[in-house]
Amino acid sequence: MTAQPGELEKRLREKRDSGHKLLVPYVTGAMTPDWLDVLHAVAAAGADAVEVGIPFSDPMIDGPTIQRASVMALESGATPAGILASLRGTEIGVPIAVMTYYNIVFRAGHRRFADTLVQSGVSGAILPDLPLEEAGEWCAEADAAGVETVLLVAPSTPDERAERICERSRGFVYGVGIMGVTGERKHLASSAAAVARRLRKMTDVPVCVGIGVSTPEQAAQVCADADGVVVGSALVRRLIDGEGPEGAARFVSELREGIDSAS
């Protein structure tokens, strides 16, 4: 099963093939009143794409920081439909992928959710609790609508299954850097480099590693083996602490500088 690369994959491939390491920051949608300004700020600061989290009440992969951001958003009245409506017409200059959980997609309906993503200007979708073996119906509707489904590979995933995930993944392949939930860590797990090296041997789709990447130094370490890096909790914590778009831009600029100086 093949599909033409969409905007997310085309952009990331173009950057990678020009010798550029990829940076994909994560922001929880509606966590603060100025979250859309944050998206503009991180894009201008050097992000190659942005991942927007749609809050869910029972997340399986989110650690305490992103859970807190999700609670902030939900308590403010955020809904999936409201977040996607806010994205509609919000041109930040780089592709947007949403990250959420399958219950939200199932409740909306595959076709309706995929169409809504397209109408909202979203290029990709990351559904960490939807396994490859059960993703066929969603992937078919997503492909038809033009939504790129980014799939995850954990350090524990057997090679045979990892190869099938890489074949089915669109946009990029999300290498999970550590067995555990999202969150900042003092040291980068050795599994981050290992999963990056393994995946890059399996696919030409860009490979970005996330979960447990917290500093510019760690991002540079990851990018020595991966095509790029996803950074979430470290950015979200700064937003929780009130640093706003300016603080977000400053941190993403530091990540960009760290990655580029090591390349």
Image (cartoon, rainbow, N blue to C red):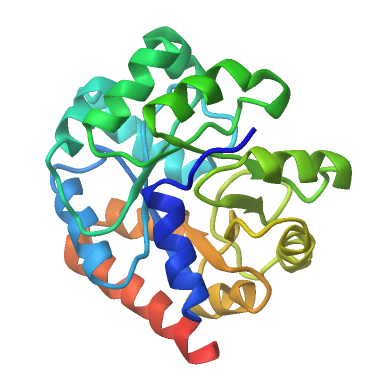
- Towards the viewer: 39 or 168: 168
Q: Is residue 235 above or below residue 159?
A: below
Can residue 15 be spotted in the picture?
yes
The residue located at (67%, 69%) in the rendering is: 188
Which quadrant is the C terminus positioned in? bottom right
Residue 80, picture quadrant: top left
Q: Is residue 122 rendered to the left or right of residue 171? A: left
* Residue 17 locus on image (x, y percent): 51, 74
Left or right: 113 in relation to 230:
left
Which residue does the image show at 44% across and 43% down from the upper left?
Answer: 66
Q: Quadrant of residue 71?
A: top left
When the figure is inspected, residue 184 is found, relative to residue 89, above or below; the finding is: below
Residue at the location (45% across, 31% down)? 100
Q: Is residue 186 above or below residue 239?
A: below
For the N terminus, give its image quadrant.
top right
Q: Is 157 left or right of 187, judged from the image as shown?
A: right
Does residue 67 appear left or right of residue 136 in this picture? left
Q: Position of residue 13 (x, y in %)?
A: 49, 63
Q: Horizontal and vertical percent for residue 199?
A: 74, 58
Nearer to me, 253 or 161 = 161
The percent coordinates of residue 116 (x first, y second) are 28, 23
Give the mark count: 0
